[in-house]
Image (cartoon, grey):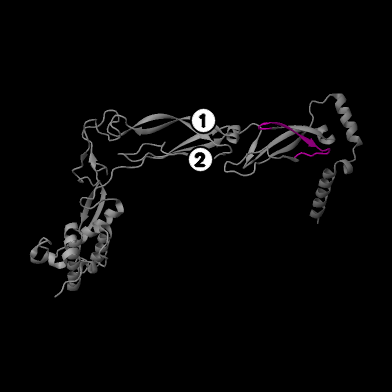
């Protein structure tokens, strides 16, 4: 009886990669494995056929011989190493699946102990002026850096880490019960795959040690609270040769005694005298880069907003510069002299509230109507 093509049995092409070949075998073998199909002779035969095909094609030398000579390369007991059709157990196949999920490797696959260092965050307090105009700041950041003595290996100079005998360098061990197999981190090497028998005295075998690094950070103009500046590679050093993490400088803009910021606009309150509000005039208001004068019309009320164009913040990501909005607060005079009180009394008597205080009269009219409507 003619034998079927091994590639066809596994449902792959003859240029399939080693990884895809393994996936194809694992997928098909799990379906027809005798442990899952007890008493099914057809499934058992199919499983033996799959195992035979995989044993040949997974071995580079046997695969090369098969590609060149076909089944003739293994006639007479050669090449296939006396194949008996036993194949892998269901637990081995199932265990390989867990190995892929949890990072373990197959026989000879190994496990890398290198890990990227942690990212760090540094909160930088800025004044409003520094945030608006930009500045260069010097910061000191505590972090874990690569040990200069052992160059991050953790081993004493002149020695080197040894392969862990518990997991054979895999970093994981297999726990099996029945046909279930689960892989977990090796308790001896803690997943590193290596044991340091002669640790570095400076870092105590950690490969990293604490340091405080001084860095210069350029703050662009227009940043605001919550903005982050990323400094690549300035985080904690990696483990076992892994890359360093990043440092994120998070901006926090402190409160200003005069201005409040809302996006790209600035706000401030400007107190003006009772007479300036009534008679009008010119008001001098502050900005972050000097002073400007604003005309105040007569009869100005508290809460009136005056907009000063382009005296706000230029956004860090570009765009039109914001404005400065000045809110007027009319200040009631205090500590009056007797003469000033007389003058104000005289002014008060001369005022016609309907003419000179229309808002006041309108408000009282609204209150009167409100109470009238409440009467039954």
Instruction: Magenta stretch: give its range.
Output: 287-303
Residue 179 seen anywhere in this rendered image of the structure: no
Q: Are marks 2 and 1 in contact (CB under 8 Å)?
A: no
Horizontal side of residue 110 vs 116, given as left or right: left
**Residue 287's image quarter?**
top right
Q: CA distance from mark 2 to mark 1?
A: 14 Å
Relative height, residue 153 to residue 98 (above, below)? above
Element under disc 2: strand
On the image, the x and y values in percent for residue 38 come to 19, 69
- x, y (%) of residue 239? 32, 39
Label annotation for residue 137? 1
> Given the current orientation, which residue lies at the most extreme left position?
76
Q: Nearer the viewer, residue 346 or 50?
A: 50
Residue nearest the observer in this picture, 283 or 2 = 2
| Residue holding disc 2 | 228
- Decide: few, some or many residues near mark 2? Use Cα within 10 Å; few <14, some 14-19, many ≥20: some
Note whether residue 299 is visible. yes
Query: Which residue is found at the position 37% from the left and 39% from the top?
Result: 244
Judging depth in this view, the residue of 347 and 248 nearest the camera is 248
Queried whether the magenta region covers residue 166, the answer comes back as no
Of the 4 image quadrants, the one containing the N terminus is bottom left
| Quadrant housing residue 37 | bottom left
| Crowd around label 1: few <14 · some 14–19 · many ≥20 (10 Å) | few
């Amino acid at each position: 009886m003619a034998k079927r093509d091994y590639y066809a049995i596994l449902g792959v092409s003859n240029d399939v990669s080693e990884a895809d070949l393994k996936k194809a075998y694992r997928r098909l073998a799990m379906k027809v494995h005798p442990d899952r199909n007890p008493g099914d002779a057809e499934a058992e035969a199919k499983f033996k056929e799959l195992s035979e095909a995989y044993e040949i094609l997974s071995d580079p030398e046997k695969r090369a011989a098969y590609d060149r000579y076909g089944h003739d390369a293994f006639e007479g007991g050669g090449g296939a190493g006396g194949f008996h059709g036993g194949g892998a157990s269901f637990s081995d196949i199932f265990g390989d699946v867990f190995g892929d999920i949890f990072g373990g490797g197959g026989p000879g696959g190994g496990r890398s102990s290198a890990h990227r260092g942690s990212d760090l965050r540094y909160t930088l307090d800025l004044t409003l002026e520094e945030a608006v105009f930009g500045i260069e700041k010097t910061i000191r950041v505590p972090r874990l850096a690569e040990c200069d003595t052992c160059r991050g290996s953790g081993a004493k100079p002149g020695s080197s880490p040894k392969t862990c005998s518990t997991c054979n360098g895999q970093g994981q061990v297999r726990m099996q019960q029945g046909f279930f197999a689960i892989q977990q981190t090796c308790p001896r090497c803690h997943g590193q795959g290596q044991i340091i028998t002669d640790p570095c005295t400076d870092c105590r075998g950690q490969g990293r040690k604490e340091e405080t690094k001084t860095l210069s950070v350029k703050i662009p103009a227009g940043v605001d609270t919550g903005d982050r500046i990323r400094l690549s590679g300035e985080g904690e050093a990696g483990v076992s040769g892994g890359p360093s993490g990043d440092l994120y400088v998070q901006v926090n803009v402190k409160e200003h005694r005069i201005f409040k910021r809302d996006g790209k606009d600035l706000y401030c309150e400007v107190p003006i005298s009772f007479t300036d509000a009534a008679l009008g005039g010119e008001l001098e208001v502050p900005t972050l880069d000097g002073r400007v004068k604003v005309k105040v019309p007569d009869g100005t009320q508290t809460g009136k907003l005056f907009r000063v164009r382009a005296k706000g913040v230029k956004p860090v990501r570009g765009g039109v510069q914001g404005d400065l909005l000045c809110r007027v607060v009319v200040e009631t005079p205090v500590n009056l002299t007797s003469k000033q009180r007389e003058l104000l009394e005289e002014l008060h008597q001369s005022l016609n509230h309907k003419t000179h205080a229309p808002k006041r009269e309108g408000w009282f009219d609204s209150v009167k109507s409100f109470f009238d409507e409440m009467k039954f």
